Amino acid sequence: MDCIFCEIIKGNIPSTKVYEDEFVTAFNDLNPQMPVHVLIVPKKHIASAYDIEESDAELIGRVFLAAKAIAAKLGLENGFRIINNCGEDAGQTVKHLHFHMLAGKTMGEKII
Ligand code: 5GP
Ligand code: ZN
């Protein structure tokens, strides 16, 4: 299986880690869209939100606990946004479930 994020998780591709625990890792996006642009990634290979199973429910909760820990670590007191792109229409390019954590300036237009 050829998965960039699995290789990053294994340490075979370098990344700037900002958080790691038993279930989740988080590293800076290579092409940041905001002053803070972190990718929060479950260590288990799940291709997309379509592929989350009942038994992954706790794991997904841990993504948000990681976000809270990252916000504390980076001092993100003014807020942050989390985005998941799932599938073609949403423009998902890396087929390993991940959550974009964006922060560091006031965000303008909202989609929702
Ligand atoms: P998607 O479009 O799938 O929601 O987001 C994929 C994200 O992964 C993009 O924002 C892209 O910049 C980032 N990305 C792709 N390859 C790498 C990589 O090798 N290292 C890091 N740190 N980010 C990557
Ligand atoms: Zn993977």
Image (spheres, helix red, strand yellow):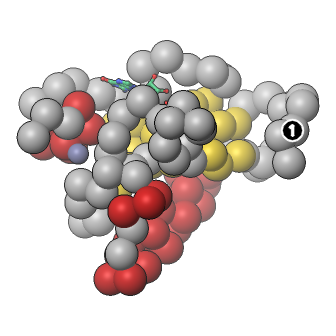
Q: Residues within 10 Å of mark 1 (few under 14, many from 20)?
A: few
Q: Is residue 56 visible?
A: yes
Decide if ligand 1 comes within 8 Å of the CB at mark 1.
no
Left or right of 44: which side holds 55?
right
Residue 105 in the image: x percent, y percent? 80, 29
Q: Quadrant of residue 44?
A: bottom left
Residue at image position (32%, 51%) is 47
Residue 77 in the image: x percent, y percent? 76, 49
In the picture, the quarter occupied by the N terminus is: top left
Residue 94 in the image: x percent, y percent? 36, 34
Mark 1 lies on a secondary structure that is loop
Residue at image position (23%, 31%) is 4
Instruction: Inspect the image, locate mark 1, and give the three-letter code of the amino acid beneath it.
Output: Lys
Q: Is residue 20 visible?
A: no
Q: Residue furthest top?
A: 31
Q: Nearer the viewer, residue 78 or 57?
A: 57
Q: Quadrant of residue 62?
A: bottom left
Left or right of 83: which side holds 19?
left
Q: Is residue 13 above or below residue 59?
A: above
Residue at image position (46%, 58%) is 49
Quadrant observed for ligand 1 in the rendered image: top left
Q: Residue furthest front?
A: 89
Residue 50 in the image: x percent, y percent? 44, 60
Residue at image position (19%, 42%) is 6
Q: Nearer the viewer, residue 46 or 59?
A: 46
Left or right of 34: which side holds 3?
left
> Where is mark 1, residue-wise?
110
